[in-house]
Image (cartoon, coloured by chain):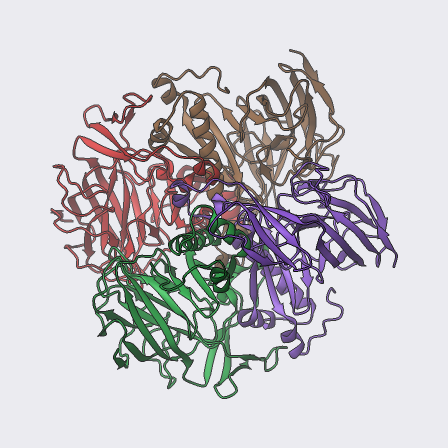
Chain colours: A red, B brown, C purple, D green
Amino acid sequence: MATHHFEPSVYYTAIGAHEAVLHIDSGDTVVTTTVDAGGVDAAGEQVTPGGNPQTGPFYINGAEPGDTLAVHFDRLVPNRGTGRTSTTIAAHVLDPEYVASGLPENGRGDWEIDLDQWTATLISPETKLGKLTLPLEPMTGCFGIAPPRGQAISTATSSTHGGNMDYRGFCEGVTVYLPVFVEGALFHIGDGHAVQGDGEIVGTGIEISFDVEFTVNLIKGKSINWPRAVNDDYILTAGNARPLDQAVQHATTEMVRWLNALGLDGNAPHILLGQCVEYDLGNVYDPAYTMVCKVKKSILQDIGLDLDPLIR
Amino acid sequence: MATHHFEPSVYYTAIGAHEAVLHIDSGDTVVTTTVDAGGVDAAGEQVTPGGNPQTGPFYINGAEPGDTLAVHFDRLVPNRGTGRTSTTIAAHVLDPEYVASGLPENGRGDWEIDLDQWTATLISPETKLGKLTLPLEPMTGCFGIAPPRGQAISTATSSTHGGNMDYRGFCEGVTVYLPVFVEGALFHIGDGHAVQGDGEIVGTGIEISFDVEFTVNLIKGKSINWPRAVNDDYILTAGNARPLDQAVQHATTEMVRWLNALGLDGNAPHILLGQCVEYDLGNVYDPAYTMVCKVKKSILQDIGLDLDPLIR
Amino acid sequence: MATHHFEPSVYYTAIGAHEAVLHIDSGDTVVTTTVDAGGVDAAGEQVTPGGNPQTGPFYINGAEPGDTLAVHFDRLVPNRGTGRTSTTIAAHVLDPEYVASGLPENGRGDWEIDLDQWTATLISPETKLGKLTLPLEPMTGCFGIAPPRGQAISTATSSTHGGNMDYRGFCEGVTVYLPVFVEGALFHIGDGHAVQGDGEIVGTGIEISFDVEFTVNLIKGKSINWPRAVNDDYILTAGNARPLDQAVQHATTEMVRWLNALGLDGNAPHILLGQCVEYDLGNVYDPAYTMVCKVKKSILQDIGLDLDPLIR
Amino acid sequence: MATHHFEPSVYYTAIGAHEAVLHIDSGDTVVTTTVDAGGVDAAGEQVTPGGNPQTGPFYINGAEPGDTLAVHFDRLVPNRGTGRTSTTIAAHVLDPEYVASGLPENGRGDWEIDLDQWTATLISPETKLGKLTLPLEPMTGCFGIAPPRGQAISTATSSTHGGNMDYRGFCEGVTVYLPVFVEGALFHIGDGHAVQGDGEIVGTGIEISFDVEFTVNLIKGKSINWPRAVNDDYILTAGNARPLDQAVQHATTEMVRWLNALGLDGNAPHILLGQCVEYDLGNVYDPAYTMVCKVKKSILQDIGLDLDPLIR
């Protein structure tokens, strides 16, 4: 149950079997930092090229293919006073004919981050939005573990290993579960957002460097197919693919499997999801889009399911 | 501002330019009923073939192509004590390989509707869900107005004219806006659900007959491209298409147009949506899927937008 | 086996259960004309609004839901000296970011049709293509029969009933098979193209009025799910949907069913298609796209299949 | 202009910046072999794990990001007497409801390859296909060069770097062009098919080991976005993505760019493609599907375009 303070000096823009920066045990906590999507750190220095550079990978001792890695996000907080966004919705999120009629030029939006007031305020450009001020909702856009068959997957996209899912629900207090494909699992994290709309439709949240603290737990011999998570109210599964229809298929199938493992067989998970399922939209900007399927824990408890352990 | 009490005797399973059952004025209210998706009424009688049969069409005097019809849902309430669902998630909402491995047989789920307790309780089949009990959240799965160019569009699907969107947010208290394509607009409504999960992934909500009351208002000379709506907290737009990606494009583009009309130009709607947009999933069961794009009214008010009138 | 000479005076831009213009028997031949997609006839007169106006519907005596209608295209020939095209590829057929960078303005291309030389020559606009001259390959972009459940489906799109498939293989000499949904079947035809690239990616072929001759044969009590066809070399099935992936699914499934009916069971149609299937692209411009699945008749004959009758 | 005889001893199932097995110059020819998709060589020995293992990578001296690599397939020929296929169409290529109704079990099809008769003959399983015999049409299912940003992309899929495109047109006599992303380009090749249907819908062609000979030419300072190719009759571009609609967008956009480079500006490439474009279907089995866009060289020559050099 050690706590490791780790200061990164190398960053990766593909999630793969890179040399581990730290070896840790199941139960350990890591206190570290991430640079923003453009490679800029807390001091405003460009320390690595942009493209969602990741801190890590962290090697979890004893992790083997077929295990599941649980990562609890203990702390995900911006660590500087400014963030930036893009300023035009991505062409592929708008009707093609509308795009052909002309879009406003994309540029850079600058935001002031006030950690005392817990707000983000638009500083520039000048628009009719004035000094639009939004409450902070910090989250990590991109995290994951090394994928199978020797792949190194760009942090511009996502798959079964996690990656750039840009889901607002991946925030402090959540525990995520990832399927282990390589020895040591090799966890990466980066791409902090102070605020983000659903879908990350301008291609950015309010991009900012983060102070990060997370705790890993290895679940030996239990395997999952897609990222899962639990928060105070919901269990949830993430599917990553294009088109979104396929992301829905992955997330829904993974939820059925999860409910099977929790004890619901036959038509039970189908009837339950039919009337109780909720979906959230992650990224609709990347090569792979993300859809999240979720069910209220209270409903599962009402029907008498034992939610401990969640991964079986 | 008349109130019309209308008892339906004919129902349609395609939304089109059928002979109107009632002519009403802008400002008028209609009190009527709808049968359930299978054509069964409040008394449990099969009064018409199934397939989301619609009450109407209602002819709004003075409505012409290029106008917008506002319909306020004054009352949408189940009017009998039993509802039914399917019991297996649709094959196209699950991973194809998972489907190939075998699904539980689809059947009929019966639910008891308690309007005093405001609950729906699963009566059969017997599963590990036991007597699963859910709070009622009544909504209309399908409504719309006659589409352009002489089309009659199946109530199994949706398009610019509305149709089978199965969005949980189309409930009592909401005002929907529809683009008028034909003289009289020709409003149809049906397919009440006592409860429904996002996406209507088993192909049904808890299907039930409804008491319906709605009030129409004609907005002359103002045109929209896709269904819009407003509720206490949000303005929202609905895009209907496959794949979901295209539904996202339609809904997002329509929201940008709406924000333009409300006074946000250039990059302003893009920056705003980039960090504030929310998406809800309507139907992922039909030939056309539905995605809803929404923005909090409070944010629009904070930046000084005048939301009256909403349609300009 | 009568031959009917029919001169149209009314045209429809949705395929549905309109009043029949002519009642014919199975085995009969119809000699008629179609206007071009813009509603202009052989004399260059605008005789009806544009939008793929259809000649028909023709009522086939004795046709009932569950039958199959065979239509042999005896003659499909342009009947005037000029055709027109659009001049810019549709925005939804190009990369969104490329579209955002600006497309050349869409306009009107004029082509001279020489029926003696059997060529189409670009007359305007002036471009580096000069007087681009192409051999004629006349085909019908849109034909079909009335769809089920009271629908009238826009001739801008396609479905199980046929419609705007824009497939180059629907040309003179081909026999198409359509599933009958209503009494009389109600066959429509229009939208002749002198030439067309795969996909109809500018939204038009070389649009032109046609002399049309076709012969119908009713196949009683045999039902199909999607349009099928046969030509000298291939049997083929058409799937219509978005995205194209789904069109592939429909066309491929229909071909497996066809091969089942022709006597191949178990893995046989799968193994055969796996190594012998060919796909052609129909429309990628419409709300529903078209993919055609085809198999060489010679291969089927080599393995001893009896191809007479084709529809069983 | 050296000819290198290379015998592979290591294989990769992800295309990336692995250590080069051979350094060659532009203009050089490599004579080598590939194992089949399952990792079995000409002698029938399993020499490496399956999953489209690649021979290579070959480092082309002087290649830098921004260059284009031309690879001419001098020889692509099966080098043993047996090949294998799967025997069931992939679930995602069929209608979901059809899949839910049950598919025949997938198994192994064995084929005898007769290089004298130039045929493949089905040996087992026993089906109504009997000893189905097809002419050989050897092609490479998977080849490519190292992708950008440190990625190693699974040979189960494809992207801008090439990969598992399974296009029947990538056969002996073709020259392919690939965008160079890393120093040395790092060319990989494998996954030979003796025969393959369009789409590789059972997930395999007739999988077999190959004798391979190819010649590389480096085109300095000329960059392309997606794989291109030229054969005797056509120039063609390949787009790789899901859904197929997006593959169409990539391939079509790349063809417009190519025609721009060859001298067609403004509406000229649009008008030309509108009436002359052809599309072929590559893989519809992988995570990324492949669509090929092609134009007859004779048409380009007729309008006076100079096709030498093709890459500018």
Residue A49 picture location, percent across and down: 19, 47
Closer to the camera in the image, A121 or B171:
A121
Task: Kindly tell me whether residue C93 is visible in this rendering.
Answer: yes
Residue C123 picture location, percent across and down: 57, 48
In the rendered image, the vertical position of residue B18 relative to residue A239, given as above or below = above
Figure quadrant of the N terminus of chain B: top right
- Left or right: where does residue C154 sit relative to residue D112? right
- What's the residue at 21%, 69% (across, down)? D61
In the rendered image, the vertical position of residue B164 relative to residue D47, given as above or below = above
- What's the residue at 38%, 84% (across, down)? D42
In the rendered image, the vertical position of residue D81 relative to residue A165, given as above or below = below
Name the residue furthest top.
B1
- Left or right: where does residue D14 sit relative to residue D107? left
Closer to the camera in the image, B153 or C70:
C70
Closer to the camera in the image, D311 or C91:
D311
Name the residue furthest bottom.
D116
